[in-house]
Amino acid sequence: MLKTIMKYIGKLGAGIVIGVLMLIAVYALPIGRMKENVARSSEVFNYERMYPQIIFGYKYMQLDNYTDSLMLGEAIYEGTENILDKAMSNYRIASDELPQDMTVTNYANDAPYDFYPVSYERYWHGYLVPLKLLLLFFDYPDIRVLNFLLQNFLLYIVLRKFHKNNLGQYMPAFLMAVFVLNPLTAALSLQFSSVYYIILFSVIYLLHLEEKKEASERKTDNLFFTVGILTSYFDFLTYPLAAFGVLAVTYLNLNREKIGIANAKDILKKLILWIGGYGGMWCGKWLAGSLLTQKNMFASAINQAILRASSIDDEVRGGVEFSRLYAVFKNIGVFLKWPFFILFLIGIGYWLFQLRKITFRILQQEISVIIIYFAIALLPAGWIFVVANHSYIHYWFTSKEFCIAAFSLLSLGIYLKNLCYDRDV
């Protein structure tokens, strides 16, 4: 047991070192071309502004140009700080004269405004590794299109892998998960793309292991731990739990013939490993940053963690307390529109029709399976309940966590349907 723990600590340490080195490497790149490409993107922000909705009135279709402008601002910041300070403090550009989306484009165009740096040290900002490299060659609209093309290609690979692993019947469930997290906004908003990429790549890798008959317990445990590390490194706190949840349901579907109490313990272990990788990597940023910059990054990070876990809306003057349960329902409310309701009714109708042969005896026999799938489906609500402040304020994208529930419940329905037909009830 101790040997295993030390092994994972070693992997976490290696992840932290590699993460630091990659940030230092991209911060050493020349900024000139990056600024030019951001400057060429000015019209996008001038036209769309901070929170454009692809379809007006649908928070589900809302982009986050505000955060994308922060990310671009970090990528092109060229202050006088040393490279270690820049790589660990991740300064963003701010101005008291301009809104955030206009700040980054005016900075890129060397406009005569007063700009100043603001440290954003509590996150890894690992997305800067690919973003800075891309900005050497492409502007913001180019990157959006590249996102769209690559993400859809990876989705195609996932579906092919589903077919090769005899999971064809589970494709609609996976596609419903993709629908809930909204691949269109994942392509057009940089900050929504990180977790989606992690989901796609990790599912492809898991299915590849299964296809080659190499999906051993050791390799799958390492995968979940690594996914936790990658999520912490690349994600800007959007819908991180989806990286675990979608992978976990895929793992369950692959092992559908032996789901039981032992499988429940296995999933719990993988959740603990994911949390260990995610939380450990995050703490690693604060430790590495504190050592390399001689700043105490723990204090501000812990204060923010306490705030994000609180049930107080700090964006209202003086702060207003809200119910954690209300935060959950506020996230669900993103999907309370007629098209989603009609789709939900069709899905429920199809689900009930497929399960028309189910009996109470089968439900009793498969109770452990039902509990496991339902427990995973409840993870998004649990996450929102715990990280209430963040989920309440940013409900329109933290609601993407419910892709886990969609995938898990539909997979359960498919599993039970197959069970009925296999037993010819």
Image (cartoon, rainbow, N blue to C red):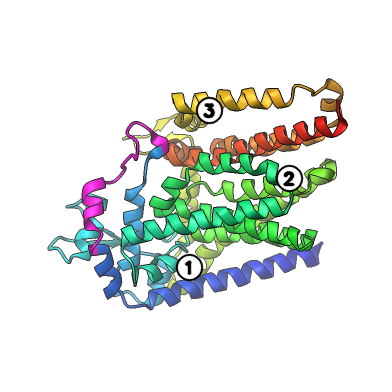
Q: Secondary structure at mark 3?
A: helix
Q: CA distance from mark 1 to mark 2?
A: 42 Å
For label 2, the crowd category at 10 Å Cα-Cα, with few meaning under 14, some 14 to 19 and many 20 or more, is many
Q: What span is in magenta?
A: 39-60
Image coordinates of residue 37 in percent, x first then y, are: 27, 66
Amino acid type, callout 1:
Ser
Residue located at (31% from left, 35% from top)? 317
Q: Is residue 118 visible?
A: no
Please tell me whether residue 52 belongs to the stretch shown in magenta. Answer: yes
Whether residue 344 is situated above or below residue 62 in the rendered picture: above
Q: Nearer the viewer, mark 3 or mark 1?
A: 3
Q: Position of residue 53 (x, y in %)?
A: 33, 39
> What residue is shown with label 2?
253
Q: Nearer the viewer, mark 1 or mark 2?
A: 2
Query: Which quadrant of the figure has residue 87?
Result: bottom left
> Which label's residue is closer to the chain start, 3 or 1?
1
Residue tagged by mark 3?
343
| SS category of the residue bearing label 1 | helix
List x then y, in percent, for residue 386: 56, 39
User: In front: mark 3 or mark 2?
Assistant: 3
